[in-house]
Image: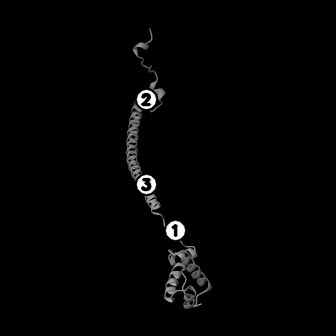
């Protein structure tokens, strides 16, 4: 079938059918040939019947309904409600981002403190090693031979506080 025949069947001017076919092509992604295939003719007839049955309906909407691509408009009250929810989500997201920034700052501070503590541990360890070396030298001098602690302390009795002194 050609466009002029379809225009005659639908009871409209051929220029109107040409516009409707352009809309049909946009909605389906098909190229409209000189000869119309049976599916195109059927869809156009169904859309015209629907548009005539509902006088306020635009032909594009009728075509979308026939093709199953129609999406009803969202009522204004729903849009307002959705916008409110989106704003609430946006506010919550901003709070999460702020909390994340604070957490990262705290972690950075903690990392710096841990680094300082590690440096202090290294310093204290070095000082303890120096003290240990010093005590070893003193111990070696007292024993004279580098002997054991028992030999260095031999003959020394522990010093007791006055209240624990043994009666003699």
Q: Is residue 109 above or below residue 32?
A: above
- Pick the residue in front: 133 or 97: 97
Q: Secondary structure at mark 1?
A: loop
For disc 2, the neighbor class at 10 Å (few under 14, some 14 to 19, many from 20) is some
Q: Position of residue 85 (x, y in %)?
A: 45, 56
Q: Position of residue 121 (x, y in %)?
A: 40, 42
Q: CA distance from mark 3 to mark 2?
A: 80 Å
Point out the residue furthest to the top here.
168
* Image quadrant assignment for residue 70: bottom right
Q: Quadrant of the C terminus?
A: top left
Q: List the residue tagged with mark 3.
A: 88
Q: Nearer the viewer, mark 3 or mark 2?
A: 3
Q: Secondary structure at mark 3?
A: helix
For disc 3, the neighbor class at 10 Å (few under 14, some 14 to 19, many from 20) is few
Horizontal placement of 90 versus 18: left or right? left
Q: Is residue 6 above or below residue 130?
A: below
* Image quadrant assignment for residue 36: bottom right
Q: Which mark is residue 72?
A: 1
Q: List the residue tagged with mark 2.
A: 143
Q: Secondary structure at mark 2?
A: helix
């Amino acid at each position: 079938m050609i466009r002029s025949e379809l225009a005659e069947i639908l009871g409209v001017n051929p220029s109107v059918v040409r516009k409707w076919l352009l809309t049909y092509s946009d909605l389906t992604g098909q190229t409209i040939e000189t000869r119309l295939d049976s599916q195109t003719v059927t869809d156009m007839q169904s859309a015209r019947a629907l548009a005539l049955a509902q006088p306020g309906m635009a032909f594009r909407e009728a075509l979308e309904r026939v093709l199953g691509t129609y999406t009803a408009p969202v009522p204004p009250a729903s849009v307002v409600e959705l916008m409110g929810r989106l704003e609430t989500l946006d506010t919550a997201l901003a709070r999460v981002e702020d909390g994340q920034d604070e957490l990262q700052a705290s972690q950075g501070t903690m990392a710096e403190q841990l680094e300082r503590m590690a440096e202090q541990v290294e310093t204290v360890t070095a000082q303890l090693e120096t003290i240990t070396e010093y005590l070893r030298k003193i111990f070696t001098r007292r024993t004279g031979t580098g002997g054991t602690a028992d030999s260095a302390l031999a003959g020394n009795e522990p010093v007791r506080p006055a209240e624990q002194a043994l009666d003699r």
